[in-house]
Image (tube, rainbow, N blue to C red):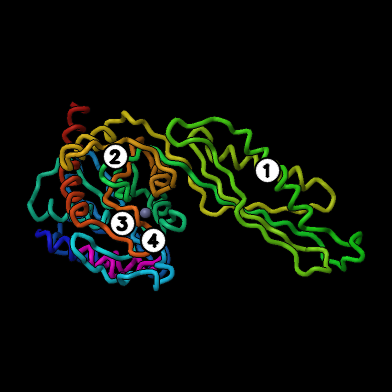
Amino acid sequence: MTPQAKIEILQHLIQIPSVNAHEADVADYLASLFAPYPQAQVERLTYAPGRDNLVVTIGNTTGPRLGLSGHMDVVAPGDESAWTHAPFGGEVVGDQLFGRGASDMKSGLAAIVITMLEFLEQGTPLAGSVRLLATVGEETGEYGAAQLTDAGYADHLAGLVIAEPSGLDQVVYTARGVIDYKVVSTGKGVHSASPELGINAITNLMKFYNAVGPLMAQHTKIDPVLGGLLHNVDLISGGEQINSIPAHAELMANMRTIPAYPNQVIYDELEGLVAQLNQEPGVQLDLTYSFPEEAIPGDPNAPLVQLAKQISDQVCGHDTKVVGSGGANDGAEFLRAKGDFTSIEIGPGSNTSHQPDEYIAIQDYLQAIDFYEALVPAFFAAQAKVHA
Ligand SMILES: [Zn+2]
């Protein structure tokens, strides 16, 4: 495939405004690229109308299987007047290609798809199979990856490479998890001249607020690369009007977890605190979570981590750093699949993800394709040595 053809695939992907929806249009387009190759097994898993995950498997299915994953959704462009290039234009200026998703992560997605297409085009013999896991809804809760995992598409992988925009000079082997939770306090609204007849929902919510900070601060373990557990109450609201005892109050908090504290440990503590406070007369607190993700543990010396570093050093001529990530990704869901495997994150990107005038350097994008095309056969060769 010519560099121009590779650039056009990325432009086409960016021109599909898959803002937390419309991933099926992305899946349609990617599936059409594989249509000339009947040996590619193309499967779709619908999450919701207009939102399909896409799975494409190529190669020798009797050998080990390497997963290549990317999400098809992007975040909203935000204030479009802040953009000097149309967010869904895919405009090329010099060595930069602009648009929402240019960095996070349509360039990574295009690069792994093109890697597979070039293997097919060139008839490259593969000692194992390569499976594309293209997901919906990564930006809003990794529920596409959750669905693919539940359906068994990530079972028995020998390794997983997620093409998120780490930059090719970084391989991510461990990541923080996330717990977003909400506590709703229900009271009884009455005229504020006779508060004894009502129940103040704000007062009761504050009991939780005052207790949860010190409770979470007891988690003092520090991960050597990720740091400590983070807990922040970021949203709070309550009350109806100035002369009424509030019947409703709520808060939302964001936690960034580390592998030392599995999410269940935190759930048990939050739920324990709520249950304890609900014993007090009049207190009614309800706790819910939205799309929590486990932290991804990892070993910097795992063979796939070291192989990715070595290949990236060779292909790109730089020193690739082995690092941790503060953000959750689809890997947290895929790790629930059957079998033990290493999951890494390495892909082309810039520091403009989720920002106006998001871009990718075309050079980095094309180099990423070379990187994945070298990584896949090297991975199978290393697997053959392990099992020889
Ligand atoms: Zn992403």
Mark 3–mark 1 distance (CA, rounded to whole Å): 37 Å
Position in image of residue 289 (x %, y %): 58, 52
| Discs 1/2, front | 1
Above or below residue 279? Residue 379 is above
Residue range of the region highlighted in magenta in the rendering: 9-28
Mark toward the start of the polypeptide (4 vs 1) = 1
Check disc 1: other Cα within 10 Å, few if <14, some if 14-19, many if 20+. Answer: some
Q: Secondary structure at mark 2?
A: strand
Q: Is residue 305 magenta?
A: no
Check disc 2: other Cα within 10 Å, few if <14, some if 14-19, many if 20+. Answer: many
Question: Is the distance from the Cβ of mark 1 to the nearest ligand 1 atom less than 8 Å?
Answer: no
> Residue at label 4?
355
What main secondary structure does the magenta stretch of the protein show?
A: helix
> Residue at label 3?
103
Question: Is there a contact, CB below 8 Å, between mark 4 and mark 2?
Answer: no
> Residue at label 2?
159
> Residue at label 1?
212
Mark 4–mark 2 distance (CA, rounded to whole Å): 31 Å
Tell me the residue at 29%/45% (across/down): 346
Mark toward the start of the polypeptide (1 vs 2) = 2
Question: Is there a contact, CB below 8 Å, between mark 2 and mark 3?
Answer: no
Viewed as shown, does residue 35 lie left or right of 358?
A: left
Above or below residue 289? Residue 6 is below
Question: Is there a contact, CB below 8 Å, between mark 4 and mark 3?
Answer: no
